[in-house]
Image (cartoon, grey):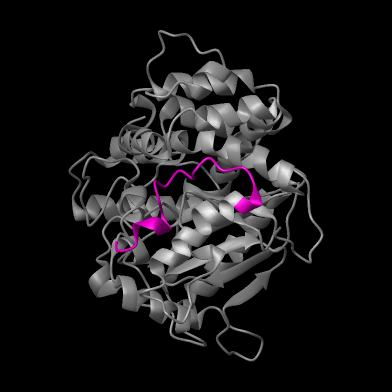
């Protein structure tokens, strides 16, 4: 059995949320790899993390990306939204001294990672160097990704089983809500959530690391160790003989168990234009998981086993491409929410879910943010409405500046043809 020393939280008692943003030049909007000159201690030394109130800001592999995260789990998502906004404002003040600013979205729309990507160079670089030696990290799948992570606690193995089963059910449908990466290298290549497409291939040399993106339906600590983690460690061992990467964070599925903090971390969400939208989507996801975790445990496990991970992956990729308009190929959530059999799109499913959960306190407080996404489209769809499928470089620069303004001002992105 896996144990940790820290006090454990029960299901839905508190949450940890992480938001990643890119640093861009205020004039050219190109990536600015300057995190090492921004993350400084009181003596002016580069550090991997600084605290801005209740929000910690830390480095990532790419030095044009910063991660904002809760310093401790919290149950007050309204306060958290304000805390994120305050931390973003403070960081933008610091970046302004170098003519830079934060920008949101799942990917930089015209970055060339081979030319513009820079790796964190300070401190112990053993892990970064090992990843680069094995996978050659000069690609979009390593350097051009910004996501929102939700950490959900479990207090014991029974709660882990419920939470893992419920997360397996919802993962394929999440890109419909949160896709925000329709452009790569200045082009729209057919997908609303391009980040997922490049993410799924960044470690293709060792496919066991990401599996089918959707986790295997396992519901005990021992099964998770034997069927997911140990298989992953064994697969990379020939390339990592010193065991540098053989820890639970190596697992890159769309949701991963973090036994070191008794939580499951959902990693499939593109970052939105401002924390109001991120927290709104996170609130709906949490409310949906609460609903599913209230089901009979045997029913919940049966639902999670209903389709193999590869089948769920195909649904995920279809939704990453087409969003709310994607065909509804799986009927697990549809059956839970008694969706009309004539409903055939993922958008109809989400309409039904939100309607069913509209009285839930987490959802009712976020009806404006959620209603905007359901009515006007996810951020990727709104960006495409704004600049079209074949934008010019100037149009993409203007759109990215507008997104940065949304982040700074805490407001949703509204396409100019609305």
Secondary structure mostly taken by the magenta-highlighted segment of the chain: loop
Nearest the camera: 26 or 168?
Answer: 168
User: Is residue 326 visible in the rendered structure shown here?
Assistant: yes
Say if 375 sits above or below 18 in the image.
above
User: Is residue 78 visible in the rendered structure shown here?
Assistant: no
Q: Which residues are magenta?
A: 205-222
Position of residue 7 measured from the top left corner of the image (x, y, whole percent)? 82, 60
Q: In the image, is residue 212 part of the stretch drawn in magenta? A: yes
Q: In the image, is residue 409 part of the stretch drawn in magenta? A: no
> What's the residue at 49%, 43% (across, down)?
216
Say if 62 sits above or below 352 in the image.
below
* Residue 362 location, quadrant: top right
Position of residue 62 measured from the top left corner of the image (x, y, whole percent)? 41, 71
> What's the residue at 37%, 39% (across, down)?
310
Nearest the camera: 411 or 48?
Answer: 48
> What's the residue at 63%, 34% (across, down)?
289
Nearest the camera: 369 or 176?
Answer: 176
* Residue 355 location, quadrant: top right
Q: Which corner quadrant holds the N terminus?
A: bottom right
Say if 307 sits above or below 409 in the image.
above
Position of residue 194 measured from the top left corner of the image (x, y, whole percent)? 31, 48
* Residue 206 location, quadrant: bottom left
Q: How many numbered markers are drawn?
A: 0
Nearest the camera: 335 or 352?
Answer: 335
């Amino acid at each position: 059995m896996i144990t940790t020393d820290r006090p454990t939280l029960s299901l839905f008692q508190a949450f940890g949320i992480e938001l990643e943003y890119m640093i861009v030049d205020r004039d050219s909007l190109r990536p600015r790899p300057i995190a090492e000159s921004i993350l400084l201690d009181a003596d002016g030394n580069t550090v991997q993390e600084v605290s801005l109130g209740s929000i910690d800001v830390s480095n990532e592999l790419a030095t044009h990306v910063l991660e904002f995260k809760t310093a401790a789990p919290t149950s007050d998502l309204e306060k958290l939204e304000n805390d994120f906004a305050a931390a973003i404002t403070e960081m933008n003040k610091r970046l302004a001294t170098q003519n830079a600013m934060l920008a949101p979205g799942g990917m930089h729309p015209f970055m060339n990672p081979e030319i513009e990507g820079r790796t964190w160079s300070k401190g112990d670089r053993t892990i970064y160097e090992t990843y680069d030696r094995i996978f050659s990290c000069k690609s979009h799948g390593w350097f051009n990704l910004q996501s929102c992570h939700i950490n959900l606690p479990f207090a014991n193995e029974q709660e882990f089983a419920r939470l893992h089963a419920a997360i397996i059910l919802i993962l394929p449908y999440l890109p419909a809500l949160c896709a925000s990466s329709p452009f790569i290298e200045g082009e729209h290549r057919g997908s609303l959530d391009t980040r997922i497409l490049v993410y799924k291939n960044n470690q293709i040399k060792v496919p066991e690391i990401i599996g089918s993106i959707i986790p295997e339906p396992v519901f005990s600590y021992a099964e998770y160790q034997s069927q997911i983690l140990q298989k992953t460690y064994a697969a990379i061992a020939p390339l990592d003989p010193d065991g540098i990467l053989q820890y639970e964070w190596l697992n890159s599925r769309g949701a991963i168990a973090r036994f070191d903090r008794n939580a499951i971390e959902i990693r499939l969400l593109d970052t939105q234009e401002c924390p109001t939208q991120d927290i709104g989507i996170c609130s709906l996801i949490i409310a949906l998981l609460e609903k599913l975790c209230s089901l009979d445990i045997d029913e919940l496990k049966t639902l999670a086993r209903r389709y193999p991970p590869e089948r769920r992956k195909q649904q995920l990729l279809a939704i990453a491409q087409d969003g709310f308009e994607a065909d509804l190929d799986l009927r697990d959530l549809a059956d839970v929410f008694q969706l009309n059999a004539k409903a055939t799109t993922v958008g109809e499913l989400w309409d039904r879910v939100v309607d069913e959960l509209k009285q839930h306190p987490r959802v009712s407080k976020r009806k404006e943010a959620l209603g905007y996404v359901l009515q006007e489209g996810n951020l990727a769809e709104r960006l495409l409405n704004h600049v079209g499928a074949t934008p010019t470089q100037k149009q993409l620069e203007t759109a990215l500046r507008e997104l940065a303004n949304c982040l700074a001002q805490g407001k949703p992105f509204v396409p100019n043809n609305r």
